[in-house]
Image (cartoon, rainbow, N blue to C red):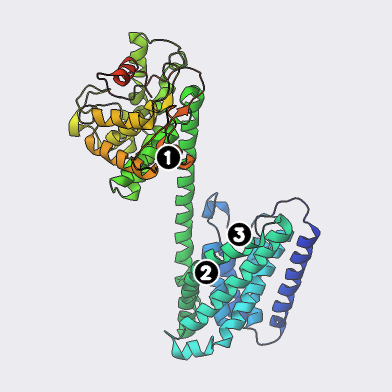
Amino acid sequence: MPAVSRRPLPPAARVTVAAVCAAGVLCAAPALRPGTPWATLGVLALLYALCEPGVLPARITGRHPPSAVGPFLPVLLAGSLLLPPAAAALVAVPGSLAGRPVPWVRRCWRAAHLAVAAWAAALCGRAVGAPGEMRTSGLPYGLLPAACAALCFCVIATTLTGAVLVTAEHHRPAAAWGAPLLAALAPYLTYGVVALTTALLWLRGYGVFAAVLVPLPMYVACWFFARARRARAAQRAAVRALVHAVDLKDPYTRGHSERVGRASAMIARELGMPEPRVDALRLAGLLHDIGKLGVPTRVLRKNGPLTAQERAAVQLHPEHGHDMTRGLAFLGEAREAILHHHERLDGSGYPHGLSGDRIPEVARVVAVADAFDAMTTTRCYRPARPVAAAVEELVRCAGTHFDPVMVDAFVRALADDLPGPGGPAADGEGTPAGPPAAAAASGAARTAPDAGPDREGAGAGIGAGAGATVLGEAVWLLG
């Protein structure tokens, strides 16, 4: 059953569930007559039940077994191609009732709506010759009944599921039926091909071995994919928690990490980096300040100039961040950006004083994104600079502080993101021209809560002129 809450079902939903359960019983009832191939039905029902989460003990499947959607559909579709409609309707019943520790109404719904869908798919398959013609003709003729059965199963299952979403959760019909049906077509057709392989092997004399040869490896693959999805979700949660921890400790720069992550990804895409490296740059931007957790809070929130000792404590944050993320193997080269995003091309940065190409490429990307967000954010010691002025400063410092290639890529990406004949433009208050989405992507002209200056040192330039003077005074304070 779809994600229906445990509160009492509305009357319309009760009627829907009861009607589908009654239809499932009517579809399966003829199987009680003589002539039902119980051996084939029993093998497929057992294999389906093993695919259902909750049937096998946790010591075999792990604490979090994979979703049954992938493995069980080829089994049900194979039953629709091999069995009479009534028998095909029974394949899902034992596993649906035995698996998933959920209320019985949900188990009955699952068994009933899958039974109705399998029954309709078997009727549709038999209308175009399954299984008789498949036994004699094989491929490519077998693709026709497999496709028809898969499409019929998809339409019926999605329609019935949508009916519960509409009646129980009050979803809009378009959201309950339209988009889910379109999204399900390709997967169901793919499962139909897997089911066809199982059915053809079965019909050619391999019997039970055919049922194990195809769906079982698919279940194992789904199990590994489920583990990978859970690991990736855990990684995202860990990153969000770390970023949130930094925001809590240094609220003045709240949102800074997210903006630097977006800007770093913009630069990476402009440089034509593959998507895995773009993701690595996004992570690097998100976590580049994680080392601030190792800097005393009183230093981060201090109103006024830092002492030499306090400045040295702030400059340790890249090394703190690198050490803190040592065990996070999924970060990959993002850790290099965490350690080196305050290095300068001329060797005057920290913590190791690297210069030129000795600075990792990912760190050179994050350095530009970090400096731009620092300059276009209002701090207690200065207002935000306009986007155009910040870009001009990046260009002026290209070759000394920043990698010219990264600066050029950022300027091009920013020009594409902020429309206007002159590229990046801003009004006199430092607020960028263009739609809000563009401002969010570029990280321009934000005002943070006045809790204290960020003193990580973004590495913006020092030079002649009023703008350079402001940056010169705040060179160790920019973040």
Residue 246 x %, y %:
46, 27
Label 2 or label 1, whichever lies nearer to me, is 1
- Determine the residue positioned at 55% across, 80% down: 81
Among numbered discs 3 and 2, the one appearing first in the sequence: 3
- Determine the residue positioned at 53% across, 56% down: 66
The residue labelled by disc 2 is 185
Residue 30 seen in the current view: yes
Q: Please state which amino acid type lies under the numbered disc 1.
A: Ala
**Observer-nearest residue: 31 or 367?**
367
Among numbered discs 2 and 1, the one appearing first in the sequence: 2
Among numbered discs 1 and 3, the one appearing first in the sequence: 3
Q: CA distance from mark 3 to mark 2?
A: 28 Å
Q: Please state which amino acid type lies under the numbered disc 2.
A: Leu
The residue labelled by disc 1 is 441
Q: CA distance from mark 1 to mark 3?
A: 47 Å
The residue labelled by disc 3 is 55
236 with respect to 364 (left or right): right
Residue 450 x %, y %:
51, 19
Density class for disc 1 (Cα within 10 Å; few <14, some 14-19, many ≥20) is some
Density class for disc 2 (Cα within 10 Å; few <14, some 14-19, many ≥20) is some
Query: Helix, strand or loop at disc 1?
Result: helix
Q: Is residue 106 above or below residue 416?
A: below
